[in-house]
Image: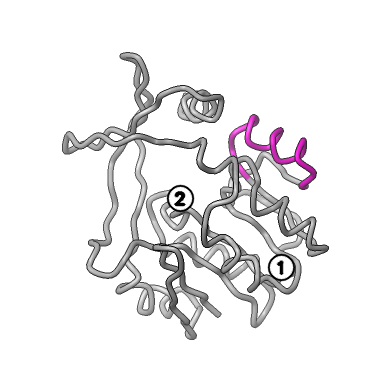
Amino acid sequence: MIGAFYESCLRGGDVDIEYADGRIRSLAAQRWLRYNEGDEHILVRCGGPTLDVGSGPGRLTVALTRMGIPALGIDIAPLAVELTRRAGGPALRRCVFEPLPGTGWWAEALLADGNIGIGGDPAALLQRLRELVRPGGTVIAELSPPGAQSGVHTIRLRQAGRTSDWFTWATVSIDDIAPLAGRSGFPVVERWNAAGRWFASLS
């Protein structure tokens, strides 16, 4: 059901995110169909095989492929996988916590667009990526800005009076990434911002 709302938004539908505390904001998934200012600051740091986690319609996976860098996008939404493949990028319909090809081989793993929130448990997600990347491999994560509050949120998607089931999603502030990364097997953290976006490289 969640995937159906997400796919509707990719097709141009108006879908909102509803928080359990009553807040509502637009999902606006169509922004992931095209280049976002600051994307180049992710791409330039990918020098080897790259796993794009929660790749959506694949703008980063496709860009890496065109750069000659082996890349694989994974997403749970069939339409997202289809759009990635149609644009020329390899992609699988897969959850990051399921068995994946190349375990222990990836040089980089991407958590762009706030995907460190996947599953509502950033520590578990980073520990899983520690398994997937090679020794010395890197996770590049897009995070909330300084001063933002990290936390786990209960949310659902809504469109035209219909709603998905509730699920959890996490946010992590750039202020809080270092201790989280260290506990998850990534002792080295480099932080930067570009085009109003905040990133960290974990290795």
Q: Label 1 belongs to which residue?
A: 106
Extreme-bottom residue of the structure: 188
Residue at 76% in and 61% down = 102
Residue 86 painted magenta: yes
Q: Is residue 139 positioned above or below 4 on the image? A: below
Q: Label 2 belongs to which residue?
A: 118
Classify residue 62 as left or right of residue 148. Answer: right
Q: Considering the numbered disc 1 on the image, is that residue within a helix, a strand or a loop?
A: strand
Q: Is residue 131 positioned above or below 23 on the image? A: below
Precedes in sequence: disc 2 or disc 1: 1
Residue at 44% in and 54% down = 114
What residue range appears in magenta? Answer: 75-89
Q: Quadrant of residue 167?
A: top left
Q: Residues within 10 Å of mark 1 (few under 14, many from 20)?
A: many
Q: Quadrant of residue 162?
A: top left
Q: Is residue 90 positioned above or below 12 on the image? A: below
Q: Position of residue 185 (x, y in %)?
A: 50, 78
Extreme-right residue of the structure: 68
Amino acid type of the residue that numbered disc 2 sits on in the rendered structure: Ile
Q: Considering the numbered disc 2 on the image, is that residue within a helix, a strand or a loop?
A: helix
Classify residue 42 as left or right of residue 84. Answer: left
